[in-house]
Amino acid sequence: MSALFSWNSLLLTGLLTASQLTAHAQVDLQTFSDATVQAVLTATMVNAIKRSNTTSRPATSAVATKRFAYTPTAVLRQQTVQQLAARLKPNNPAAANSLATGKVDYSTIYRSIVQGTSLPENDAAAALASYLITGYLIMNGVHDDNAITPSMAQGVRTQIAGMLASNSQLASPTAVAKLGEEMKLQTVLLTATWQQSIKNNNEAAFRTSTGQLFSKQYGFDMTKVRPTAKGFAPR
């Protein structure tokens, strides 16, 4: 089985051609936040974790699973990159320019990150799960590519789908696709920036800034949870 979140070779692939972005993005990690994601999850994540050991799993049906699948387009991918560049620009114009003008094939990199897992590639709930799991790995200093099993990844995806299912902001296929591509790109950037921090012997500081971001966005401490087959659960 291919390793989950195999970030060790990402920058060596040459796919992230805007190479200077990672150094700049470390400084302004909080500009990666997405308003839609915050609105969807901030108030619900803690309760979902508390319920994770119960038998209630409303998102396991085929209908709920299928709802967050989508078909990406080249136009949407381009819009995703440009919109994130626009959010970066006020505080970090150099990083914004690198992202906007570079040929960032984030879809291919994202595919390599989740290869061999149970997570579908084009699925908004799975993309958000990938982002959160990456945050978990960073904040807990986990460098083992095999630490997250497919059942754990699917459990987090199911947990996330349960929270997204009732949100009116994601009622349309367009909104689902937009969220999915946004979180794919954010997962790639977060992973690449993590690798860069390790390369620069700055992982501890990056771990701190990432912890602050996730605590602000999602309202819980990633060092106090663990991924399970039922999603994130208290340690």
Image (cartoon, helix red, strand yellow):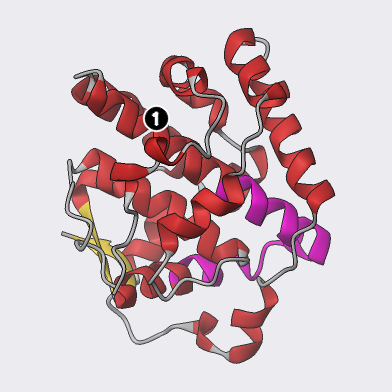
Q: Secondary structure at mark 1?
A: helix
Is the N terminus in the top left, top right, bottom left or bottom right quadrant? bottom left
The image quadrant that residue 17 belongs to is top right
- Residue under the point 43% across and 37% down: 190
- Residue under the point 44% across and 70% down: 159
Is the C terminus in the top left, top right, bottom left or bottom right quadrant? bottom left
Q: Which residues are magenta?
A: 159-184
Can residue 220 be seen?
A: no
Q: What predominant SS class does the magenta segment belong to?
A: helix
Was residue 174 drawn as part of the magenta stretch in this picture?
Answer: yes
- Residue under the point 62% across and 36% down: 104
158 w.r.t. 203: above or below: below
* Viewer-proximal residue among 152 and 150: 150
80 w.r.t. 180: above or below: above
Q: Is residue 57 left or right of residue 204?
A: right
Badge 1 crowding class, 10 Å Cα cut-off, few under 14, some 14 to 19, many 20 or more, is many
Looking at the picture, how far across and down is residue 224, in whole percent?
A: 20, 49
Q: Is residue 118 left or right of residue 137?
A: right
Looking at the picture, how far across and down is residue 125, in whole percent?
A: 56, 64
Mark 1 residue type: Thr
45 w.r.t. 54: above or below: above
Can residue 21 be seen?
A: yes
Was residue 135 drawn as part of the magenta stretch in this picture?
Answer: no
The image quadrant that residue 56 belongs to is bottom left
Looking at the picture, how far across and down is residue 14, in whole percent?
A: 48, 36
Q: Is residue 42 left or right of residue 170?
A: left
Looking at the picture, how far across and down is residue 76, in whole percent?
A: 79, 49
Residue ID for mark 1: 193
